Image (cartoon, coloured by chain):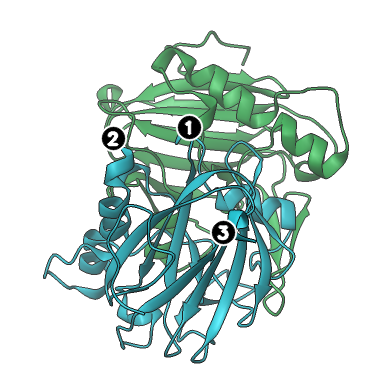
Chain colours: A green, B cyan
């Protein structure tokens, strides 16, 4: 696999460390998000192709699953309570859906880092810019492979190294036409301070 | 207290069961959200007065607090990572910040209810309509007094009756000029199937 141009044409590709990529899916298309080396996170968000005011909603998805952590069989809903993505296969089993993507400001506030790196927020916004979606509209992402532990008594959360090993993947089915954006995560705490790539593959419904 | 007109003029009031209310706060104003009878939930959201593309973000707030459940001393951030509201006082101590407001569609999907009640989502959108904010833009709310238990092993969540007793309140300080909308919650599971009112009071910085 190699780096791919933006614009939704790539059928498979590698997302370079600390970057993002957007692509389009038709209903029935499958997107496979792969951690090629292990312990890397991919923040994924999605918008309806026909009306980007409809977007992937963590709050709806968690409510309908009655579970913070979604896996095989679970459905990811839009803010309009319509199914957007269905998890067909998940070889890792642990992802986060509560935190916003890492960002320049988050690096300053939590890590005291002032390099001005765009983070997943900036990388998602850049990938989504051709669709008219701005930084303000990047929501809480489905943070694939991100491992957030919760203390059930205090609600304390702790970001731990991902449980994903090399080759682990999540296979998602698009339930509506959509734009998906995803990253190879830029937050050290999320990927055990090794900034690695993320691979993806699209299985088109039209090719089956 | 009595029912108050919408439009941000009321300095105190009662939000009738299964309804919503919007008001404006200047920097330094304090908003007290009160559960007058106990075991009731108020979904609260906020938008910057000068640019409503800036809104209260659960994902940012949880990330910066490193805690799912926020209480006295915690800051509620916007999607732009700016402080919006500061919790000055909290006599209950347990609130939710992970779930979207209950909605017509949520009542259908989770409760099999087809009466078409607008839920907190519809009531927040109606209260925010004068500010040009539509249903699509109602985010995950700060669900005051909502008690969501989490299983730390499975991530399973369970909505339980609120821990709030009659008179419990949360006192919030506005950190920027904003529009706030809040409800007396319409979801039976959230308020132990007793649909009660919510009271509020504003302490204006200009009057101190």
Residue A53 horizontal side relative to residue A66, left or right: left
Whether residues under marks 3 and 1 lie with C-beta atoms below 8 angstroms apart, the answer is no
Q: Does B188 sit above or below residue A205?
A: below
Question: Label 1, on which residue?
Answer: B51
Residue B113 horizontal side relative to residue B200, left or right: left
Tell me what residue is drawn at x 57 percent, y 40 percent.
B79
* CA–CA distance in space, label 3 to label 1: 22 Å
Whether residues under marks 2 and 1 lie with C-beta atoms below 8 angstroms apart, the answer is no
* CA–CA distance in space, label 2 to label 1: 38 Å
| Placement of the C terminus of chain B among the 4 image quadrants | bottom right
Mark 3 neighbour density, 10 Å: few (under 14) some (14–19) many (20 or more): some
Q: Position of residue A119 (x, y in %)?
A: 70, 29
What secondary structure is found at the residue carrying circle 2?
loop
Q: Position of residue A178 (x, y in %)?
A: 34, 29
Camera-side mark, 2 or 1: 1
Name the chain under label 2: A
Q: Say whether residue A88 is visible.
A: yes
Mark 1 neighbour density, 10 Å: few (under 14) some (14–19) many (20 or more): few
Marks 3 & 2 on one chain: no
What secondary structure is found at the residue carrying circle 3?
loop
Say whether disc 3 or disc 1 marks the residue closer to the N-terminus: 1
Tell me what residue is drawn at x 61 percent, y 63 percent.
B172
Name the chain under label 3: B
Question: Label 2, on which residue?
Answer: A28
Question: Label 3, on which residue?
Answer: B204
């Amino acid at each position: 696999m190699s780096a791919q141009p933006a614009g939704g044409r790539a059928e498979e590709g590698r997302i370079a460390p600390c970057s993002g990529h957007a692509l389009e899916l038709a209903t029935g298309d499958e997107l496979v998000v792969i951690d090629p080396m292990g312990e890397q996170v991919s923040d994924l968000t999605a918008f309806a192709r026909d009306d980007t005011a409809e977007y992937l909603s963590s709050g709806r998805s968690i409510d309908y699953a009655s579970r913070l952590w979604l896996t095989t069989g679970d459905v990811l809903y839009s803010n309009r309570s319509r199914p957007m993505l269905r998890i067909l296969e998940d070889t890792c089993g642990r992802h986060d859906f509560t935190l916003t993507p890492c960002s320049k400001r988050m690096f300053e506030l939590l890590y005291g880092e002032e390099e001005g790196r765009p983070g997943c927020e900036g990388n998602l916004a850049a990938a989504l810019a051709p669709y008219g979606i701005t930084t303000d509209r990047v929501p809480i992402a489905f943070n694939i492979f991100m491992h957030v532990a919760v203390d059930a008594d205090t609600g304390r959360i702790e970001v731990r190294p991902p449980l994903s090993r090399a080759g682990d993947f999540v296979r998602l089915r698009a339930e509506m036409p959509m734009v998906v954006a995803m990253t190879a995560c830029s937050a050290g705490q999320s990927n055990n301070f090794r900034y690695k790539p993320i691979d993806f593959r699209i299985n088109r419904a039209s090719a089956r």
